[in-house]
Image (cartoon, rainbow, N blue to C red):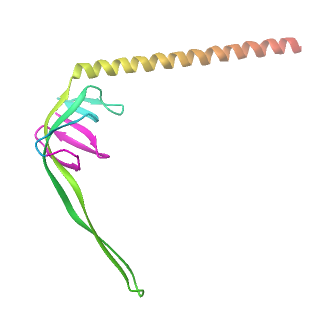
């Protein structure tokens, strides 16, 4: 079983027991974190996609550490001008242990069915409105042509 979650503007594929390094979260080591932006869940060959997120799906994790990434050196130079500038940057990151993926498969499936049914009903209404206006326009044109003759 795995899930795809979104955090910090990035997407991560996670399984239970995985350790991931993500953008910094303002939590202390040992605290629990819940990721509610779940895009996809795969469970024994059954795949559920969100639109864009799955309802009633969560991924729980524990903060292991607050760390810094590798140093990135930014060096600027303009030749023949004596211009040199050297800067460095280290991104702050959070290491998270994924505890469990919570998804009530039946609830998600039911919610998706309701969503699809609602969309199909709306589409049918739109189609009926279009056909009714088209038929009214045809009738009006026929009557106009009869009157003009």
Q: Position of residue 110 (x, y in %)?
A: 29, 18
On screen, residue 44 versus residue 135, left or right, reads left
> Which residue lies at the image location 35% right of the left edge and 34% below the top edge?
52
Q: Main secondary structure of the magenta part?
A: strand
> Which residue lies at the image location 71% right of the left edge and 17% below the top edge?
137
Quarter holding the N terminus? top left
Tell me: residue 12, above or below residue 89.
Answer: above
Residue 23 part of the magenta-drawn span: yes
Say which quarter of the image contains residue 35: top left
Magenta segment range?
Answer: 1-28
Say which quarter of the image contains residue 92: bottom left
Residue 27 part of the magenta-drawn span: yes
Tell me: residue 134, above or below residue 52.
Answer: above
> Which residue lies at the image location 38% right of the left edge and 21% below the top edge?
115
The foreground one among 49 and 27 is: 27
> Which residue lies at the image location 20% right of the left edge and 63% below the top edge?
70
Q: Furthest-right residue in view?
A: 149
Q: Position of residue 31 (x, y in %)?
A: 13, 40
Q: Position of residue 87 (x, y in %)?
A: 30, 71
């Amino acid at each position: 079983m795995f899930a795809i979650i979104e955090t910090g503007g990035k997407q991560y594929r996670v399984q239970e027991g995985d350790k991931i390094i993500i953008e910094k979260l303002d939590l202390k080591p040992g605290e629990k974190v819940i990721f509610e932006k779940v895009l996809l869940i795969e469970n024994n060959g059954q795949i559920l996609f969100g639109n864009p997120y799955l309802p009633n799906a969560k991924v729980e994790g524990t903060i292991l550490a607050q760390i810094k990434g590798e140093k990135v050196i930014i060096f600027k130079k303009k030749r023949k001008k004596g211009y040199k500038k050297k800067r460095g940057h280290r991104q702050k990151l959070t290491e998270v242990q994924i505890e469990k993926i919570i998804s009530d498969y039946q609830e998600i499936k039911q919610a998706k069915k309701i969503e699809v049914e609602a969309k199909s009903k709306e589409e049918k209404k739109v189609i009926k409105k279009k056909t009714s206006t088209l038929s009214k326009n045809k009738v009006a044109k026929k009557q106009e042509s009869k009157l003009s003759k």
